[in-house]
Image: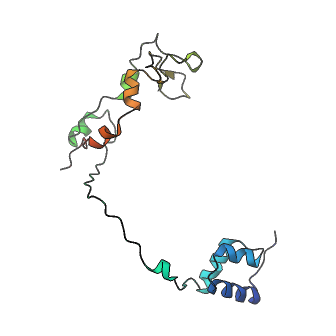
Amino acid sequence: MTVLTWSDDRVEQLRKLWEAGLSASQIAAELGNVTRNAVIGKVHRLGLSGRAKSPASAVPRPRKARPAQHIVRVARPVSRGNTALAQAFEVELEPDPIAFDNVVPMSQRLSLLELNEATCHWPVGDPSSPDFFFCGGKALAGLPYCAHHSRVAYQPAADRRRQSPKTTAR
C-alpha cells in the first residue's frame, strides 16, 4: 500500500480544481492515486468548503402544499399478554395472533415438504424451533393462505388508514 502525502503542488492543484467548481470525485480522478474521501478531508482541513453557489441552486424551489394531518404517536405496552400494564395505559387488547395460531389442529399442521397449492402456507413459530409448522388449512383460490390468514396478510389500504389509534393518552 502506497501512502501519498499532499505535496505543495498537489494542494495547489486541489485548490484550483475546487475553486473551478469540480466535484470531489472529479478532483480525485484528475489528481490520481487519491480517493474522493481524501479530497473531501483535505478540502475541509484547508477550509475550502465554502463555494459560491450557482444561481440555479441559490433560489429555493416552492414547496407543494400538503393537507394538514393529525398524527398521534403512542408508546406500545411492553408485552401484549400483560393485562395489568394494558389496563394502566387503558389499552384495548387485541387477540394474540400467536395464541390463535397455536389452536391449529395437530392433524392440519404441515411441514415445508407437505405444502401444496391447496394448503395454507402461513408459518407458525420460529423456523429454527422443532415446533415450527405451517397452518395447512384449506387455501383460498389463487392465494397461499386460508381465509383467516388472508385477512391478516392482506388488509385493504383504506381500512388501515381509517383505523384510529387503539390507545388513549391521558
Horizontal arrangement in the rendering, residue 44 relative to residue 27 (left or right): left
Where is residue 141 drawn, in percent x and y? Answer: 45, 19
The extreme left residue here reads 170
Is 139 situated above or below 57? Answer: above
Give residue 100's quadrant in the image: top left
Where is residue 150 drawn, in percent x and y? Answer: 40, 26
Q: Nearer the viewer, residue 79 or 106?
A: 106
What residue lies at 59% left-to-right and 85% top-to-bottom? 48
What residue lies at 30% left-to-right and 28% top-to-bottom? 95
What residue lies at 31% left-to-right and 44% top-to-bottom? 76
Is 131 situated above or below 155? Answer: above
Is 127 situated above or below 41? Answer: above
The extreme top residue here reads 107
Task: Locate the N terminus and report the quarter of the image it occupies.
Answer: bottom right
What residue lies at 31% left-to-right and 40% top-to-bottom? 158
What is the count of numbered marks? Answer: 0
Where is residue 22 drawn, in percent x and y? Answer: 64, 79
Where is residue 12 drawn, in percent x and y? Answer: 71, 89
Q: Nearer the viewer, residue 20 or 87?
A: 20
Give residue 28's quadrant in the image: bottom right
Q: Nearer the viewer, residue 110 or 85?
A: 110
How is colour applied across the structure in the image? rainbow
